[in-house]
Amino acid sequence: MIGRRQFLGVSAAGAAVVVGFDPSGRGWVTEAAAAGRPSFAAAPALDGELLLDAVSRQAVTTDLGNIVRRAPRAVLRPASVADIAKMIRFCRAHGIAVAPRGQAHTTYGQGLSAGLLIEMRHLDRVHALGPRTAEVDAGIRWMDLTEAAYARSPRLTPPVLTGYTGLSVGGTLSVGGIGGLVGGLHTGLQVDHVRALEVVTGTGAVERCSRHRRSDLFEAVLGGLGQCGVITKAVVDLVPAREETRTYAFGYTGTAAFFRDFRTLVERPGIDHIYAEFVAPGTAPTYTIHATVFHDAGAPPDDGRIAAGLSAEPEIADAGYLDYAFSIDRAIDALRETERWDEYVKPWFDVWLPGSTVEDFFHDLMPRLTPRDIGAFGAGLIYPQRRAHTTRPFPRLPRRDGSPWAFVVDINTVSPAPGPDPAFAEEMLARNVRLFARTRERFGGTLYPIGSVPFTPGDWRAHYGDRWPAFRAAKRRYDPSAILTPGAGVFGG
Ligand SMILES: Cc1cc2nc3c(=O)[nH]c(=O)nc-3n(C[C@H](O)[C@H](O)[C@H](O)COP(=O)(O)OP(=O)(O)OC[C@H]3O[C@@H](n4cnc5c(N)ncnc54)[C@H](O)[C@@H]3O)c2cc1C
């Protein structure tokens, strides 16, 4: 069957979209040439597909945030790493921007491109699994890797899993990957549990890198926002998985009482994961702690010991390990089915707070936080991260302050209704700019760059601080023509 895409697009080695005949040049004019830009007509032969048709391009003009729109001129559906290398070389020769797209769950255009967009989800194989590592394509979702690892005997799991696991391995390794439902108390971030990477750099070279081999590239791509290369494969840690989980939910109205118990629980032996939710004051409880113990069947934790000395009584819920690990995915799937979740505007605010100022941050924030700041389908979230296990220079955690902890705070704002809402986006982007300035200046916070905080090149230089020269040197070395991943505007966009 010949689909619409084949009528409007080009095959891997085929012709570009023809829009008219140029009598002076005595040739057919392609869409790109008509717009005065280099054409993809001379693109190399590929194993996969290069699509120029409007439908394929329009399908990838935005991300989960629905704030920034940028249509690429071409979409690559790679069938091999060689496809990515060839197209990056082609784009470099023609001065065309390139961005890899995982699941596009960042919210402010970080992964958009007006040039070539690479749909990484088409490379999603598990190449090797267990007993201590997995080698996977970067386009695979964490959920799929987790299911494959858990199906082994003995059962395995990544040591760190984001709350939503429908994210790509390459997408979270490019930002950091904090333990939304697994990891954080006794692990680093996902980037701390990577043994080796295969990367296609901005020159189109395919490189293997690790802590011991091309360590500058390894450092620059883990948490590196796609600036120095496209991660194509990753060797990631696996650890033994437990069969069951028990989660204790504690509710609070006051910031001080909440933090007293939160601080106690993050240090309490036997707890495997903990995070907290918050809402605007006025709705009880304002804060809810979720503390989880992983255990084997028939060996549940001692409830009395977990809850001892706290000021709230817990509600207790049991679940199998995978049911627990995929619980946020189920919630998001339900929102997709009932609420047109993907179409809401999501101007998210995500920051790291130093362990010594996180309480002050909340005492300052809460009197001004309104229900509109979060929205009916949004969330306020707090994740503790033990600093001793963080090893990578990027992402940028706050300056060390003597505390063993740093905290990620998310205000995952969702608009009142689905569909475009430029006024709401503008209002919340302005809030994010104000709130970020306050967070940085008063509380020593840094950006977790998954959300929608407008940043100038100067803000990025400040963000990287003393690591800026190393990051810029890696950019110049591995992406000398500065074609990779312009969305966040780190090097000027
Ligand atoms: C519901 C939800 C829950 C979340 N929970 C957590 C959580 O618990 N912990 C956490 O840390 N984060 C969480 N996030 C944020 C998430 O980790 C980031 O937004 C992540 O970047 C999304 O992955 P993705 O595959 O959608 O990446 P994309 O949004 O597609 O890409 C992110 C950036 O990385 C680049 N990129 C993508 N693939 C590659 C690659 N292979 N090589 C190089 N660069 C690449 C893109 O160009 C873009 O700049 C959550 C997000 C959502 C929507």
Image (cartoon, rainbow, N blue to C red):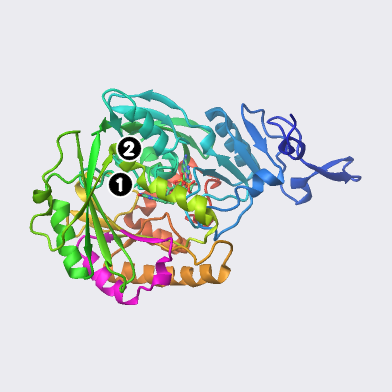
Mark drawn on residue 257? none
Figure check: 432 above or below 57? below
Q: Secondary structure at mark 2?
A: helix
**Amino acid under disc 2:** Leu
In front here: 159 or 78?
159
Give the mark nearer the N terminus: 1 vs 2: 1
> Which of pointers 1 and 2 indicates the residue nearer the eye?
2
Determine if the magenta segment contains residue 372: yes
Q: Quadrant of the C terminus?
A: bottom right
Q: Mark 2 and ligand 1: say if the CB distance to the nearest ligand atom is below 8 Å.
A: no
- Give the residues in magenta: 353-381
**x, y (%) of residue 237?**
30, 32
Circle 1 crowding by C-alpha within 10 Å: few under 14, some 14–19, many from 20: many
Where in the figure is residue 41, as x and y percent of width and height? 73, 37
Q: Which residue shows up at 15% across the image and 60% down it?
A: 261
Q: Which residue is mark 2?
A: 322
Residue 211 vs 429, above or below: the answer is above
Q: Are marks 1 and 2 in contact (CB under 8 Å)?
A: no
Task: Please tell me in which quadrant of the rendered image residue 187 appears.
Answer: top left
Give the mark count.
2
Kindly identify which residue carries mark 1: 181
Q: Residue at x 36, y 34 (%)?
A: 146
Position of 31 with respect to 67 (left or right) is: right
Q: Which picture quadrant has residue 49?
A: top right
Give the residue displayed 60% in from the left and 52% down from the top: 61
The answer as to whether callout 1 falls within 8 Å of ligand 1 is yes
